[in-house]
Each structure stands twice: as C-alpha cells, then as structure tokens.
Image (tube, rainbow, N blue to C red):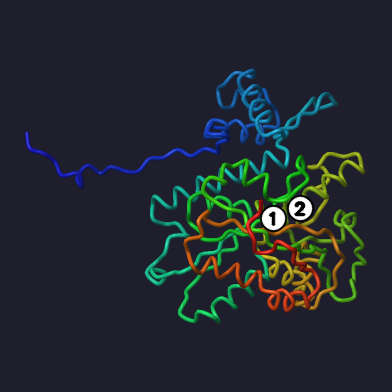
Amino acid sequence: MGRTNPGDWHLQPSYTVSLNQDGRKLVGEPEVRMLRAVDQTGSFSEAARTIDVSYAFLWNTIAQIERAIGEKIVYSERGGVKGGRAGLTDQGRRLLQAYSDLDSSVQQFLTGNSQSQMDASEEHLNLSFMGSHCIVVEKLLRRLHDKNPKMTYQVRNIGSWAGLTAMMLRQADVAGIHIFDEEKSSYNEPFVSRFGLLRTCTLVRGYEREQCLMVRKGNPKKIKGINDLTRKDVKLANRNLGSGTRILLDRKLRELAVTRGVDFETLTKQIRGYDSGIMTHSQVATAVTSRRADVGIGLTCIAIDMKLDFIPFAVEQYDFLVEKRMRNPYVREFFEILRAKKFQNEVETTPGIKFLKGSGRIVG
C-alpha cells in the first residue's frame, strides 16, 4: 500500500482554551456554556435543562468557580409575582469576555486571520502595543519614534482585558491596563497574579489618570454626576466591554443601584446609550462633540484637548505589562522616556495625569 503525502490528509488545527488558576482549569468551554445558559434563560433550572445537565451539577460548578476567584459571578433572586430569577454579575460578564477574547485570538491565530499577526507591511515591526487607550502612550511612542526614526510600531486600542490576553498569547510587547480589583482594593496587580502572568511577564508602574464625565461646553444638560445618567433626556457614550473605563463605570453604577434600592440590570436599562461600545476615549469625546451623545466617560486630559467641559469622576492607576526579561531594546527605551523628568513635566502641563515616584519602574 503506497504512502500518502501528509499534505493530502487535509488535517485541520483543533484547540481548546481555558482560563486557569494555579495550574488548574477554572473556566473552559463547558463552564462557559453554563454561564451563557444562565444569562440567556435567567434561571438555574432552565439553564440546566437547556444544556442537558443536572441542576446540582450546574450549581456546584458555578459555586466552585466563585470560591476559587473569591467573587460572585452569578446572582439569584427569590420569589416575587413572576418567581425568582438569575443572571450574571459584572464579574461573571468580565469572565465571559476574557474567555471570548482568548478563544477569538487563538482561533484567529490558527486560521491566519489574527489582527495581531504581521501582514506583509508589518514584517519588520519593532514594537507592538495593545491594551487600553491612553493619550500618554501616544506621546511616549511619538517621542520614541522621534529618537528612532526607522523604528516601526503598531498600537491596538483593544481594552485592558484584551491587553492581558495579548500578553498571554505573546502577541504584544507592551500592554496598557487599568483594572480595579474590588476585593483587594487595588489596580492591576491582583489580576496579573490571578491569571498566572507573573511567570512570563512583569508589571511596570505607570501613572495616575483622572477620569471624568465629558459634556459639551456650557454643559447644556446641566449634568452634575452619575445620578444624571438615568435621566430620559440624557444619552451616554459608553466604552466597550472589557475596557477598564467600562469596568470603572459599572462599579460606580453598582454603588448607585444599592443606594437606590434596585438591581444593577434595572438601573442600566434606564440609561440611554449604556450598551454602546466605543473603543477609545477620543471617540467618546467626538461622540459628545458631535451631539451623538450628551455625556461620555473618558480621560480629563482628552476632554480638555477636545475643548469639552468635564466633571471629575475618579482617579485610577494605569500600568504596563511587558515580557519579563524586556529583551526588546525599544521596550526598555519606552520606559526610559517614561521615567524622564523632562517628559513627565511636559505631560503634566495638561491636568488629569500624575506621575508617581515609581513611574517607569518594575512593581514589587
């Protein structure tokens, strides 16, 4: 019997992805199916029937995930005229988003359609930045390019969670992140540790950024704070799922929901434009300027640059995730510029950015 050429076998790549903790699988495709079923049906029992598993198995699986990460990913409500109901918490939605981002990136990588893969014009790319959009990053990269005119680089503003995913897949040289952990009451470090990135990556301290409610000059809708987002005459330009800014807003909205005595979903349904998913702070500002929205969540420095009025909203920590050894010389030079007092003083002439004693240095 003659041998066939491997190229005639028509083999296709197959893969499975999962989010792990301490070397153990935490969330894979079966767990994702359960979470999506709960989200779609609004009921543990209906979800179990939909995916053909027992109620006890579904409940125990979700409980195990919650114990592992120390946060609720599903909420449940008892009684009422229409009976109880269940759904995903914000952390549950973030978990699904992180899994979806990872699954999509791996699939695109295997099929050759990944945005992160270099096309013919990117064969000699020297530096790839992915993660949360920031005007300071843009200035850093321009300064780096001015010093190295032949350097080529790309910026993909895909949000903090997707930036973490890009570092997991080694698709980026630098990722910008600002994700708040409510349990630890701190930014970024808990998530880098939780997702096992400390073995291959290093967290470098960035700077503090002020987020604000952007409004048009003169504040025609007289917006004073987050309470006004539920007004019927106010439309919001919201950031994309997985972005640190969206996570920040949701945290503030959960606090508001508690104050008003309603659940989070009921509150967000009252907000016009809540489900919009704008990718950058600049695009949010443009939506407000062009009157497509009355208010947007974004950086104070960008509101000022776009000649918008603003109401201070929160101060957050923006950091960088890089390959542990920093073998790329342009990455090292990127942080040399960040540490330079001259650069810091120039940036701080615009309100809303504050450099720290450890800016540009490894955390820990």
User: What residue lies at 70% left-to-right and 35% top-to-bottom?
Assistant: 73
> For mark 2, does the 10 Å Cα neighbourhood hold few (<14), some (14 to 19), or many (20 or more) residues?
some
Q: Residues within 10 Å of mark 1 (few under 14, many from 20)?
A: many
Instruction: Check disc 1 and give the amino acid type.
Output: His
Quarter of the figure with residue 134: bottom right
Q: Quadrant of residue 318?
A: bottom right
Q: Which residue is pictured at 78% across the width and 45% down the height?
A: 185
Furthest toward the left, the residue is 1
In the figure, 27 relative to 136: above or below?
above
Of the residues tagged 1 and 2, which is closer to the observer? 1
Q: Are marks 1 and 2 in contact (CB under 8 Å)?
A: yes
Is 95 above or below relative to 112?
above
Is 361 rendered above or below residue 121?
A: above
Q: Position of residue 54 (x, y in %)?
A: 60, 18
Instruction: Please say if 93 is above or below 302.
Output: above
* Residue at the spot of label 2: 248
Give the left or right position of residue 171, taking residue 72 as reference.
left
Please identify the quadrant where the N terminus is shown: top left
Q: Amino acid at mark 2?
A: Leu
Spatial CA distance of label 1 from label 2 is 9 Å
Q: Position of residue 90 (x, y in %)?
A: 72, 42
Residue at 55% in and 70% down = 333
Residue denoted by label 1: 178
Q: Position of residue 347 (x, y in %)?
A: 73, 75
Tell me which numbered mark, 1 or 2, is placed earlier along the sequence. Answer: 1
Secondary structure state at the residue bearing disc 1: loop
